[in-house]
Amino acid sequence: MEQTQQNSPDALCAEILADATRQGGQIRHRAETEAASILSNAASEAEKVRSKTIEHARITAKKQTEMILETVKVERRRMHSARVEALLESVRDEVRRRLRPADAEAREIVVALAAEAIGQMPANDLVARISVADQSAFGNGLAEEIIRQARRPQLRLTIYADATLTSGDVTVQDTDGSQFWDNRLQARLQRLWPELRRQIAVAAGLVSDNNASGGPYDRNK
């Protein structure tokens, strides 16, 4: 009679339900454990990503700051160089303006410039070219005066008027044109300007002596 009750449908159902309850509890426990592990791992990875993101942002911000500061430095140097160049160019313009000798000085200047050019040329037959106005104003004896100042008594010097020259200008060449010396006032300024501008810049405190021989304000213009 008792065996019949154990095998009854109600007893089987109760046993199945009890077993299902036990398995369900085990599954739920495993699921909760796995979920906790996943959440923990996710939180750890999130923190790593967050740290990497913050570090990357910090490095990027530092680089951008350094670039901005360097740009400011470059721009400041450029502006300083531009101001220095403008000041030096204004000095050069003033020098050009003053390289127009007065009539009373023109002959002395022409003689000195011609003698200087002759000193660079070994030939004994030379031609000096001066402006039309100077030739008209100076009259005779200019060639002899130049030869005396050049201390070349054996020199044969011919004076020609050149319509392209202005008062105070001189060019000297030999008779076959193989040697030529341009001693016009503006040409002399052109040759001397690099060193002059260096000295002016240093004397005026526009640049240091170390920087005056190079950089953007040392162009040979």
Image: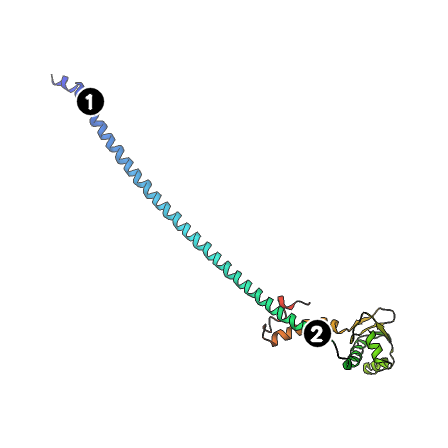
Of the 4 image quadrants, the one containing the C terminus is bottom right
**Disc on res. 97:** 2
Q: For residue 211, what is the image quadrant? A: bottom right
Q: Residue 195, can we see it?
A: no
Q: Which residue: 50% across, 59% down?
A: 68
Rendered residue at 71%/76% (across/down): 98
Look at the numbered disc 1 and give the secondary structure of its residue: helix
Compared to residue 53, the image places residue 195 above or below, namely: below
**Residue under numbered circle 1:** 13
- Residues 144 and 41: in front is 144
163 sits to left or right of 212: right
Which scheme is used to colour this image of the protein?
A: rainbow
Task: Please name whichever residue, 207 or 35, is drawn nearer the observer in this view of the structure.
Answer: 207
Image position, residue 55 (x, y; %)? 42, 53
Indicate the quadrant containing the N terminus: top left, top right, bottom left or bottom right.
top left
Q: Marks 2 and 1: CB-CB under 8 Å?
A: no
Q: Amino acid at mark 2?
A: Arg
Taking the view exactly as shown, the residue that stands out farthest to the left is 1
Residue 178 at what x, y percent from top left? 84, 68
Residue 32, located in which quarter of the rendered image? top left
Residue 9, image x and y in percent?
Answer: 18, 19
Number of residues whose C-alpha sits closer than 10 Å to that of mark 2, classed few (under 14), some (14–19) or many (20 or more)? few
Q: Position of residue 71 (x, y in %)?
A: 53, 60
Q: Is residue 39 left or right of residue 155?
A: left
Three-letter code for the amino acid on which mark 1 is drawn: Cys
The residue located at (14%, 17%) in the rendering is 4
